Amino acid sequence: MSSPSAPSTTVDPLSAPPRTARLGTVLFVVVTAYLMVGVDSTVVNVALPDIQKDLDFSPTGLSWVLNAYTLAFGGLLLLGGRVGDIVGRRRTLTIGVLLFATSSLLGGLATDSAWLLAARALQGVGAALIAPNTLALITTNFPEGSRRHHALGIYTSMAGIGASIGLVIGGMLTSWASWRWSLLINVPIGAAVALALPRFVGETPRHAGQFDAAGALTGTAGMTSLVYAFIRVSSDGWGDTQAQLGFSFAAALLAGFTLVESRAAQPIMPLRLFTSRNRAGGYAGVLLLPAGMFGAFYFLTLISQRVLDYSPLRAGFAFLPMTLAMFTVVRVVPRLLARFGAKPVLLTGMALLVTSAGWLWQLRPGDGYSTGLLGPLVLMGLGVGLSFMPLNATILAGIAPREAGAASGLLQTLQWLGGTLGLSILVTVFGTATRHATGSPSEILVHGSARAFGVGALIALTALLVSALVITGRKPERAEGTA
């Protein structure tokens, strides 16, 4: 258990906040850092066959090109957010970007499988420092209101846009050059962002006091165990012994983490974040929505290449209608929030996501791109654009500046965990539906995917109902926990 320590004290002042004219530059630099993480979530996927051939991966070992990154990223997100609170978010983000770029360089130069897997794990560590601190810097650099809503709208769209762009870029680089460039492309971008951060982005205060070592240890170990268990479920099913052990260890460690946090003077995850009804409902939303949506994204990628016979490059371009719809709608969401408030906009977006998943539920083997996929992809883009920004704004509204990193880290952790959980569930549904199915491989794929889309629709509907019943839509009167 962590020993009590003195109350948090600011030990250096916030750097002079950027002038209004420079807020656009701040947003560009911060969002570019986050975009690197979004692109990296898919850019390697289309390169996996070439990586397997070049570095002699086994079929099971190849999955760890993705899993090594995922395990480090998911396990360290909470810690990454809290480190930013303590040592400064701009400083932490800069370290994360440099680590991400350096590990990308090492991965691009890999000559064997172990080298590449180590580099991918280091990328995950860098991403865990980047993701929560980009969001926290937006919270601290942009005043609450229309400016922050605009910034959050652009930021929110970057995960989906980055994933779509990653498929296109990965296909282009793999087809025209080498799989290595899907990693090496991060090096010049990361170097430029690291140089721009101290010039354009103000540093945040650092808070003195004892670091919550027990919370960091139990929380990181618990999240890592949980992530590992979900990875095992995705590949081997819910009956896998190692998955069950992972879930057991995760339950014990996270129970211990909760006990530690309830007693720590400076917890890595302040439990008072959940005392706000709106924030608790927002956290539930960012857990459930990715659970229903990210799995659909996975199956649509398979359908576009294995059923429609698209090349990796064409498959990437097939998702651009979703990206364009998302990017278009986030430009008007700040005005919608100002006029109607967060809750109506959020519920509209969630309803569109439920409709999109329900439409995909009806997918049949004879459906082409224009009749079976285009409409749901557009609705998905609109729904994401209308849903995630109000969720982020609801969670971060009224948050004390000294807890912005912890709140952002928890938001990112739940969002990522929801996607992993959802993919595990939908892959299991797919496997059950196709185990005794008959027909051609493409017919079996579409049949199983449609069943998975149906479960995704139910998860999205649950998110809609929870948000409707829990989130009140009222604004906080003051920053909670302000020192």
Image (cartoon, grey):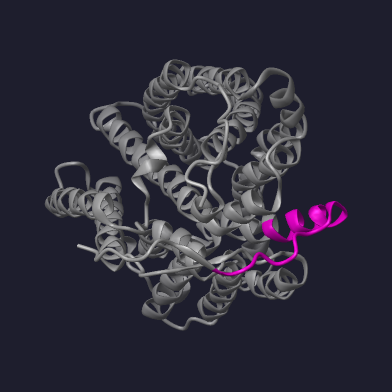
Q: Residue 368, percent across and down?
A: 60, 25
Q: Measuring from the top left, give residue 111's x and y in whole percent.
A: 46, 83
Please give the name of the residue rendered at 35% of the width and 34% of the height, measured from the top-left corner. 426
Depth check: give the residue in front, 416 or 306. Answer: 416
Span colored in magenta: 11-30
- Residue 434, by quadrant, is top left
Magenta residue check for 426: no
Counting from the top left corner in percent of width and height, residue 429 is at: 30, 31
Position of 47 relative to 121 (above/below): above
Question: What residue do we see at 42% from left, 27% from top?
Answer: 277
- The residue nearer to you, when weighing 462 against 309, is 462
Position of residue 469 in the picture relative to residue 127 (left or right): left
Near-viewer residue (76 or 173): 76
Q: Quick check: is 22 in the magenta stretch?
A: yes
In the depicted structure, whether residue 7 falls above or below residue 378: below
How many marks do you count on the picture?
0
**Residue 292 x/y as whole percent:** 43, 31
In the image, is 91 to the left or to the right of 121?
Answer: right
Q: Foreground: 367 or 26?
A: 26
